[in-house]
Amino acid sequence: MTQDHSTQSIAVIGAGAMGSGIAQVAAQAGHPVILFDRSTSALQRSEQQLQKIAKRQVEKGRWSNETSKTIQQLITRTEEIEKIAGCILIIEAIVEDFQAKTSLLQIVESQVGADSIIATNTSSLSVTAIAGQLKHPERCIGLHFFNPAPLMALVEIVPALQTDNGIKHQCHELMCSWGKSPVIAKDTPGFIVNRLARPFYGEALRIAEEGLYGHETIDSAMRAVGFRMGPFELMDLIGNDINYAVTCTVFEAFYFDPRYRPSLIQKQHVDAGWLGKKTSRGYYNYNPAGSRLESNTNQIAESEHSLIISNRIVAMLINEAADALRLNIAQESDLEIAMTKGVNYPKGLLAWANEWGIANVLKELEYLQKNFGEERYRPSPLLKQKVEEGTLFHV
């Protein structure tokens, strides 16, 4: 890439919500964009959706009429893959399926020049394995945007084992020029966000399985410590099918480490078709418009019980972040940015550990491990090291 990024054409493959959002972000940064999809209807929906977005932005005074027109004109939608030939960066944003992605990227590779960067927006597949299916894996990289792409600041940059080091830095610079908050993550299961966030759901489900607290009480406890939504509210929003699938992927990828074990409760919700808002029933009930119906129980955690719940879940989250740092998944600052910008945590997990007291976090984990006798609660060696040294995380 040259220094003047905005003169270069970007291709996005897949005109669904994610692909259309990425195309919008690139166009807002001034790039000519080729948005490819094999489906005419998908391309038409993408165009209509951007027209609605642009109209709202103009009405709210965020875009001028000229800006709105320019952004829309910068995106060329096509069913002809050959149109991507001159693009310097191609971002694949199709279904989360290894075979589908690799088959498509092999076609992409045959259409573009030797200097073009090929990126996958995968959220859970191995970028190294995807790159391994290409003739020139050194130009393949992961660019994981978060939905909705125009609003979410975080982009996880995930180099494959084979990726040329210069491409990693070029993509970081480009994402900054798009107004994003990029972080660099090692190509390991879940990258940063989907790995570090697993205990938010997994430990909440585990507490519910024990029958001591209901999902409303658990949600209330987590909102009380600053989370915008409780874990069960968030799983209903994401979709239990999607959240369960990610958990299963991470669990299998980590060779069935008990720390990531999926929950029977969530599997049963998926089996029952209780997927959350999109099916009008999940852990909560919803009307057709997606608003939550009033509960008969209306459980609110008392302060003492609220702390028992939140301390347990937050300790597990911090433990995951500490282990990710220990294993060089990402730098401290990138771990913090990922969780505050990617999933809107009230504070970075390492900063939270410093604030709570690393010794207190360790004490909580050791209590859980002793009480349940499970490897699931093993404290990160880095937490033990910090306590022994009397040092804090550098955040």
Image (spheres, rainbow, N blue to C red):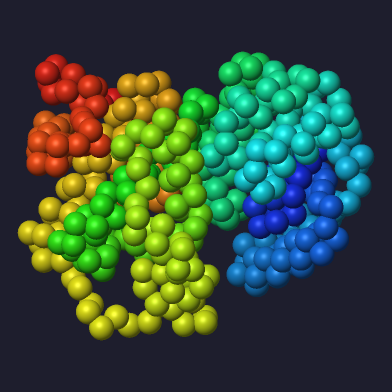
Report the quarter where the N terminus lies.
Answer: top right
* Left or right relative to 340: residue 158: right
Q: Where residue 351 appears, x then y in whole percent?
A: 26, 36
Residue at the outermost left position: 304
Q: Where residue 367 appears, x then y in whole percent?
A: 9, 38
Give the total of numbered labels: 0
Q: Is residue 179 visible?
A: no
Above or below: residue 42 compared with residue 386: below
* Left or right relative to 162: residue 326: left
Q: Where residue 145 appears, x then y in whole percent?
A: 58, 44
| Front residue of 135 and 90 | 135
| Front residue of 386 and 152 | 386
Q: Residue at x 26, y 68 (%)?
A: 216
Res. 291 image quadrant: bottom left
Q: Is residue 80 visible?
A: yes
Q: Residue at x 67, y 66 (%)?
A: 53
Res. 83 image quadrant: top right
Q: Residue at x 83, y 58 (%)?
A: 39
* Left or right relative to 175: residue 365: left
Q: Where residue 4 appears, x then y in whole percent?
A: 75, 30
Q: Residue at x 58, y 55 (%)?
A: 148
Res. 88 image quadrant: top right
Above or below: residue 309 compared with residue 316: below
Report the quarter where the C terminus lies.
Answer: top left
Above or below: residue 40 compared with residue 383: below
